[in-house]
Amino acid sequence: MNGRLNPGQLTELAPGIRRVLAPNPGPMTGPGTNTYLLGDREVAVIDPGPASDTHVDAVLNGAPGTIKWILVTHTHLDHSPAARALAGTTGAKVLGRPAPAGASQEAGFAPARLLDNDERLVTGEFTLRAVHTPGHASNHLCYLLEKCEWLFTGDHIMNGSTVVINPPDGNMQQYLDSLRRLKTLRLQMLAPGHGELIDTPYAAVDWIIEHRLQREAGVLAALQTNPDKSAVDLVPVVYRDIGEHLHGVAVRSLLAHLLKLEDDGRAQRNAERWRLTED
């Protein structure tokens, strides 16, 4: 089912489900962004990917039928920008949610159809249900292919690494709540925005939740022994398990944990320095 991930290569994952990998590998994108093509006669594209002419051509060439819809999970620059070129070539309707403010967002992204939680795209071949999953991004949507119970997760769940929660748009409490919401859905497969398919969806969700809670416990322990430190100061204490080259990214998720603890009444700050809340 899963063939090796090669940029530009069309891989059939299941009947009516295909994947094209974008040529944007990196520390935050893994092998690159997965673009999914659903349907045989009329095609829906999920996450068109970065602004790359070669990738747009690969998607156009890989579509077995007419591309009618382009669905975006969120508007980070490795997921949505190719929608403009793809829609311009095909006339397809773009669906998703507008971009929030932020340097990592595709400013000005405005879908032709705005999707709310539980809204559906119904075609002659399949039905896709939008599942609003804020946390990694406030406008993040997953898409549930109802007939086979595959969930296209964008950056809500990645295979091979955990996602960065980057405040102010990223929110750790919302992320945990969104993960727990997935457990109420009937799921057979997770199709992530980066990495291979995940055929143990509930175990994957449980692992991420437990990992985040363990990291939160590590933040609390670090504050106990290192009061009045900044998030940058706390990264080497909390993230001993990652290389220093990733500390600049880790500080964003660490800040998200601290902000959650502040909202929970368990941590407080003075300027940029953090300590446990006194009983």
Image (tube, rainbow, N blue to C red):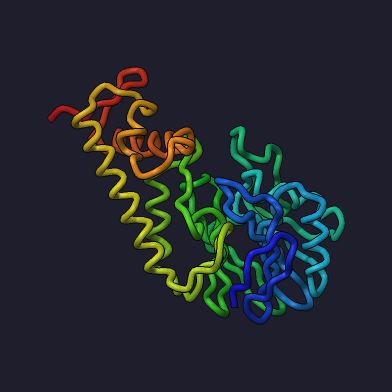
Is residue 87 or residue 276 the one in the foreground?
276
| 86 horizontally vs 203: left or right | right
Residue 12 or 178: which is nearer the viewer?
12
Indicate the position of residue 216 as horizontal and vertical percent values. Answer: 29, 43
Q: Quadrant of residue 179?
A: bottom left
Most foreground residue, 13 or 160: 160
- Specify the farthest residue to the top: 271
Q: Which residue lies furthest to the right in this view?
A: 89
Look at 47% across and 38% down and name the residue there. 246
Question: In which quadrant is the N terminus drawn?
Answer: bottom right
Quadrant that contains the C terminus: top left
Q: Is residue 48 left or right of residue 223?
A: right
Q: Is residue 209 visible?
A: yes
Q: Is residue 252 left or right of residue 142?
A: left
Residue 252, visible in the rendered structure: no
Q: In which quarter of the image is residue 17?
A: bottom right
**Closer to the camera in the image, 212 or 264:** 212
Residue most extreme to the bottom: 15
Residue 243, x across and y down, in percent: 43, 40
Residue 151 to residue 110: above or below:
below
Residue 4 image-quadrant placement = bottom right
Identify the residue at horizontal 78%, vertical 66% (top origin).
68
- Residue 102 on image: x %, y %: 59, 34
